[in-house]
Amino acid sequence: MQINENSRISDLLAHPVGHDVIRKVFLQIGKPFSWVANPIVGRLKLKTLKLMAGSRLPESFWTTAFELFNSEPDRPSSGPGDGQATWWKEAVFYQIYPRSFKDSNGDGVGDLGGIIDRLDYLEDLGVDALWLSPIYDSPNDDNGYDIRNYHKIMEEMGTMADFDRLLEALHQRGMRLIMDLVVNHSSDEHEWFQQALADPDGPYGSYYFLREGDGQTPPNNWVSFFSGSAWRWFPEQKRWALHLFSEKQMDLNWDHEPLRQEIYEMVRWWLEKGVDGFRLDVINYISKQPGLPDGDPFVGELMQFYGIENYYYGPNLHRYLRELRREAFDPFNAFSVGETPGIGIEMGRLMTASDRKELDLIFNFDHLEMPGEVRFNDYVYDLNFLKDYYFTYHGRLSGKDWISVFWDNHDNPQMLSKINDDPRWRNRLAKLLLTLQLSMKGTVFLYQGQELGMVKQPFEHIEQLRDVESINKYEELLRTKTPTEAWATVMCGTRDHARVPMRWDESALGGFSSVEAWLPWPASDSGWSVREQAADTGSVLNFAKKMIGLRRVETALRLGEIVPVDAKRDNYMAYERRYEASGRTVRIFCEFNLSAQRLPRKTLGSMYMLLISNIDERMKGDPGLELEAGLHYMEPYEANVFRITD
Ligand code: ISL
Ligand code: CA
């Protein structure tokens, strides 16, 4: 069914793209989605809505929206899954940002040798698989997300021999490795782009988006995620080149068949080496609207990035993903997780349902900021929102769907700091977050430092930052704001919070390197290093190990159904994980106080056996008895996991 002016809001919400776009718009403007989801509003026709919105939503917006909705004829599949066991559904992944993990040769930059040195640590932590942020040859304009040579290891990271050693060592330990695949763009220093510049009308010219011009007006109004126009002018060639990210990250033209074939061949080359899969950088951006039309200004203002509706769910996206899987991933039975900014629940299902043969998983980002907020805003994150996100998400999935569970990575300040930066709660809240993540249904992706309760950094001025996004953003803000205001904004959202080195010990250089790191910590953080925490039974690190271990032994935590309990209750989150095995149901009960206040609660009976708690006293003595004796409240940020016996 086509979506048009005569469609009702309920028709729109039944449409995967319609549903996700409307949900996104409500997130963006900070209004509750329940407003449109209500049946009375649902009966309204879109033309009524159009009338009500009047000039606030220009005609061009409606044209853009209808085109986007109607570009998707498919509906997410329903019904049970194929019941096949797959390692990646049960795995705990650990993301390493190699520059900041461990330096092995004293140049201040983390490297492959450093990761090899710390494999015992990772194995002991209990993680099953590593994801490495890019380690390929790169001029490092965006720390390796600008690749110059896909077949070579970045000099700072080591050699191909080091890589082979790492892969072998991991496999010997029964662990797996996935690489970062950055193929929406390449570095401007990549040979393909150099060839394209040498002869823009030759074979490599079509590998990119090159457009003739006068150097004054870019071909369209699209903007870069790293500030300014998305077009860079090359005076010698008299051409513009498209770059959605930094001006050294040139977008590749996936509509050009030879380019796609080169990419598939490169992916096969790595899979032949034995890597177990890939995380695919901004993979939903690879198919651009033909003709690269201007972005709608209304959408541009709303989403903060002009042009985005022309490439975040492009016309050939599904086709290219299927081709990539068929040509490269499937022959090796390799795993894929797509990084997909802007993709909502239903569109995500269309990219990952097991019968669609596209990706295995995606990263949906809708939970990382509260409604109406962006990463650079100063606000407090409310865990009730995270609760609603997961309950809603799980409520919409079928047996063919599976999701990723994450909230920290190299692009985002730590969730822990966004929720409550009072040092009093750091230990307990870090443990709550680990308990929640590791008892949630879905594939867990931990980011380095989460197991230590790492937090945002007290950077003081822009010279301390290295990230191209932060530096460009600061420059851009200075045009309209004072330096103090500009700094305050950058400080809230800078990706460098997540990129400072791991602290291995309490020494000044943190045991990371023998010299000052490429991105030093602005302050010391006594008590929170790996060495200090390893020696402390109450540490976040030891808790993380226990919780990962619990997930490993409790099948219900990995594969069980998730059943929300008292879902409407504010500041309280609880669910059961249920798993049928040999005729009986294993039931695990997880409960969380989402606030910094005590929370009254009903006494749990003796059939609740405590498995883990972030309140040490709860774990002493006979947990069953103590709970029966009357536990009428939960402590601030308390998190418990019980087995329900009968
Ligand atoms: O920058 C954004 C908007 O503010 C993000 O939504 C962005 O699209 C997303 O973070 C993309 O990230 C990935 O690709 C980038 C790289 O800099 C990031 O580190 C990587 O995770 C370009 O390759
Ligand atoms: Ca090094």
Image (spheres, rainbow, N blue to C red):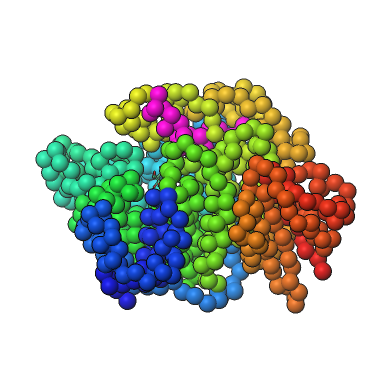
- In reply to whether residue 493 is colored magenta, the answer given is yes
Q: Quadrant of residue 560?
A: bottom right
- Give the residues in magenta: 484-504
Residue 69 at x, y = what percent?
31, 66
The reply to whether residue 243 is visible in this rendering is: no
Residue drawn at x 72%, y 50% is 600
Q: Main secondary structure of the magenta part?
A: helix
Q: Quadrant of ligand 1?
A: top left
Residue drawn at x 76%, y 34% is 535
Q: Quadrant of residue 521?
A: top right
Residue drawn at x 33%, y 45% is 304
Q: Is residue 582 left or right of residue 478?
A: right
Residue 490 at x, y = what percent?
42, 32
Figure quadrant of the C terminus? bottom right
Residue 298 at x, y = what percent?
27, 51
- Name the one closer to the observer, 28 or 325: 28
Figure quadrant of the N terminus? bottom left
